[in-house]
Each structure stands twice: as structure tokens, then as C-alpha cells.
Image (spheres, grey):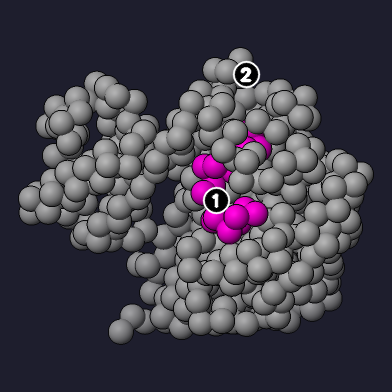
Amino acid sequence: MKAANDTSQICFGTDGWRGIIADDFTFANVCRVTRAIAHYLETAYSKSRPVLVAYDTRFLADQFAKTAAVVLADAGWTVKLVERDCPTPAIAYSAKLLNSAGALMFTASHNPAVYCGIKYIPDYAGPATSKITDAIVAQLDRVSTRPPSSDRTDQISTFDPKPNYLRFLYTLLDIERIRKANLQVKYDALFSTSRGYLDVALSHCGCQTEAFHMQRDVLFGGGIPEPKGKQLRGLVKAVQQDKAALGVATDGDSDRFGIVDDQGNILTPNAILLLLTRHLVEQRGKTGAIARTVATTHLLDNLALKYGLELYETPVGFKHIGEKMRTANVLIGGEESGGLSIAGHIPEKDGVLAALLVVEAIAYAGKPLSQLVEEAIADAGGPRYEHRLDFHLSNSHKAALMDTFSQNPPADIAGIRVKQIGRKDGIKLYLEDGSWVLLRPSGTEPLMRVYLETDDLEKQASIAAHLERQVSQSF
């Protein structure tokens, strides 16, 4: 059994630190991580600027947030604590709007109910860069796990980020066009923070909206707050029964989206990225670059070529997309795991905005969503078929496998010649027929993720089987 103040498991991944509640994610470790963040804040901000603290719907997240608020106040910071659970993009927007020293968000996003997490969001309203999280981690062994020595409640106030956040979202949308379409939308909150946000926005836009799972449930109905697969079965059924235009959902902290089309198909994030890129360029007349992660569909590259747009490829993790959006004119940035943002918005993924943009795309085109997606994929030279394999490997096995592929890369995969090898994030094998394979070890879990994309389902199965054999034969 680990001691309560054990920090060996405190590891910041692509989007903060997550752990199992009452195992490594304890009040003691929350005090430690919050103090480490406070030390970083003193190097970057004046204490005249407030620190924001927010949380999602999971068990004890509100209490962890209140503990962090007291720790920050004890360190001399003025703290603004949200009145209730809220979306990550809402607190991120507030971090910028309120000229803050950044925000602490207690969330484990789409992870199961036993997890909680904490992420620091700087004042630019996007994910913290590796430089920032490294500076925070460097302080962990220098700070205490003790409770705050004083209860500086006079330094803590509460606020509601919703009104300003929704007002801002409305400036990014063609509200009147959406209202004229009078679309029927089914919305599954999945017990997440988007309840009271996305449903309100849909109603404001004139949509006939039916909402499900709108209460806080720390066990997420016995499932996980991830808007994909079996979690969306109820939403699929509702769309099909009432012949709705679409169904929408978000993950636990509402930064990722799930979309069901008019036929009841659960659409992939890659398909939505293609749809919205096409919509923003052709219907809204927007321009700018496309930014995608190394694991996201290359059909976006084809759209970039078609529209004469620059294409940026980043490592996995929206913090890299966000950083590119802060330094370049990016029209749309996204990742295959369900995060996106657009020009004019904050450099943070936003599932609420993504759902509203899909509604806007339907309103503009006056066509069923299933048809729009089919057209977008065809325009991009598709279809292409994506797949992900997860191999549960020890850290030593992960390292050995990466060494094997790095030092002695295969000449072919399933009989298709490897023409190029990329090492931006993991090892990416570009095949001569346009297919690709990405091997990427998790930095926080004993897991090797393998992504692939190809133009044929039989070929996809063949490549997947080849990779499974190679991994199993490596040990």
C-alpha cells in the first residue's frame, strides 16, 4: 500500500495528472500538487491576478477543488471558485477573460468514475505546455502534503462562468441561420458538465431539443463519460425513433464531442473534422491553416491541398494543437480522439462548440448530416478506414519494442512497402499505398497504442493482424 503522501505516481501526461481516487489521488496529494502549481504561479504572475478553480461532476471533485482553493488562499492568492461543476472550455475562457493567473480544473475527462485529475490552464486559455508542467513537477518533492495552516475564506469568492462563456460562443455561430432551420436535436449529457450549457445553447439557437442524463451522477450511470460506442446507444435509439437531425453528446468535462447522424451512425472525430473544415471554408468563407495531430486522418491533408491551406502536423495531445493555434493562423485544429477548436475561439478543445458547429453546418447546407459527411469524405479523397490497437505492455517491453522498430524498422507491413519513417511522436511508418501506421507508447500507462489508416477494410484487417503478430513475437 502506498503512503498517502507518495508522489511516485504523480505524473503529468498530455493533459494534466490523473489518478485513482483514494489511492494516489488523495487530499494530501491535491495539497502537494496545488502548492507546486502555486510555486510556478509566483514565477509567472502577480498576486494581483486571481486564480480560478473549477471541477467536473465526478466523486469528490468539488471537495478537491475547495481544498485547492484554500491552499491557494493560504499561499496569498485571491481565488475565484466556480458555483457548480463546469466545462473545461468554460473555465479556460474565463481564465483569459478575467485576466487571471490561470485556472485549476479538477477533472479526469472521459476516464472511468474511479479517477479524478487536475490540470493547470494558463491565462492564454489553452492547455499548459510541457515547459510549464515540467516546472510544476520539479516542485513536487519540495512542497508539503499538509492541510492549509489557515482558512483564508476572505480570499475566496464564487462565480458563474456560464453567461460570459455562452455569450462568447454565440459570436462564433450564425444563430439566425440555425434558427431558421428549426432542427430537431437529441442531446445526451452523459451526466457531464455540459448539462445546463449545451442544452441551453441549442434552445437559444431555436433547436427542438430533448435532453437525457441531465443530473449529476458520480458513477456516470454505471458507464464512463466517453461519448462513443456503447455509451451512445440510448442517443442512437432516440435519434432513430424520432427521426431527429442529429444527436450530440460530450465527455465528462465537455472538451470532447460525440455526434450521431440522422441515420443513427456514430460519427468518428475524423469525419467531423473533415465536415467542419469543409463547412468553414465553403459555407462560412473562412481561411487559415489546418492543424492535426500525428494520429489524425491524412484526409485533412487532402482538404488542405484542395483549398490551398497550410497543414501543420503536431505530436499527440491538444496542448500541441493549442500552441500552434496561438502562434499561427489556424482555421481548425483537431485530434482523432474527439477534440477541436477553430479560429477566433480559445486554443482549447471544446465539445460544446463542436456540437453547435455541426448543427450550423446542417442548417447552412439544408441536407441530412449523413449526406454531408459522405460528401466531405469524398471531397477529401476518401473513404479511409482508421483503427487503433491497444497493447498492454510493461514499460520495459514498450521500450524494447520501440527500440526494435527504431533501429531495425520493417521493410513492409502486411506486404506493403514502408517508404518513409517519421519520429515526431513515437514511430510512424508511411506505406507506399498511402496507408500509415503509428506506434506510440503511453507516457502514463503500461500501454502501447498503435494507430493505422488505410483505404480498404480488408487491408485494414491485414495490417492489424500483421502488427499483432509482430508485437507478440517481440517477446
Classify mark 1: helix, strand or loop: strand
User: Closer to us: mark 1 or mark 2?
Assistant: 1
**Disc 1, disc 2: CB below 8 Å?**
no
Tell me the kind of residue under disc 1. Answer: Leu
* Left or right placement of residue 4 versus residue 39 in this view: left
Residue 152 x %, y %: 76, 77
- As for residue 117 lying within the magenta part, the answer is no
Q: Where the C terminus falls, by quadrant?
A: bottom left
Depth order, front residue of 314/251? 251
Relative to 21, does residue 375 appear above or below in the rendering? above
Find the distance from the CA under tag 1 to the CA under tag 2: 23 Å
Which image quadrant: the N terminus?
bottom left
x, y (%) of residue 434?
A: 34, 25
Question: Is residue 262 part of the magenta span, yes or no?
Answer: yes
**Mark 1, residue position:** 267
Which class describes the residues within 10 Å of circle 2: few (<14), some (14-19), or many (20+)? Answer: some
* Quadrant in the picture for residue 63: bottom right
Q: Residue at x 59, y 65 (%)?
A: 236
Q: Could you tell whether 288 is left or right of 384 in the image?
A: right
Where residue 332 sits in the image (x, y, percent)? 64, 34
- Name the residue nearer the viewer: 350 or 72: 350
> What residue did someone put label 2 on?
307
Name the residue: 29% across, 24% down: 433
| Left-right relation of 330 to 78 | left
Q: Nearer the viewer, residue 332 or 118?
A: 332
Which residue range is magenta in the image?
A: 255-277
Residue 12 makes an appearance in the image = yes
Residue in the image at 32% along x and 33% along y: 436
Which residue corresponds to the image point at 39% horizontal and 43% vertical from the top-left? 386
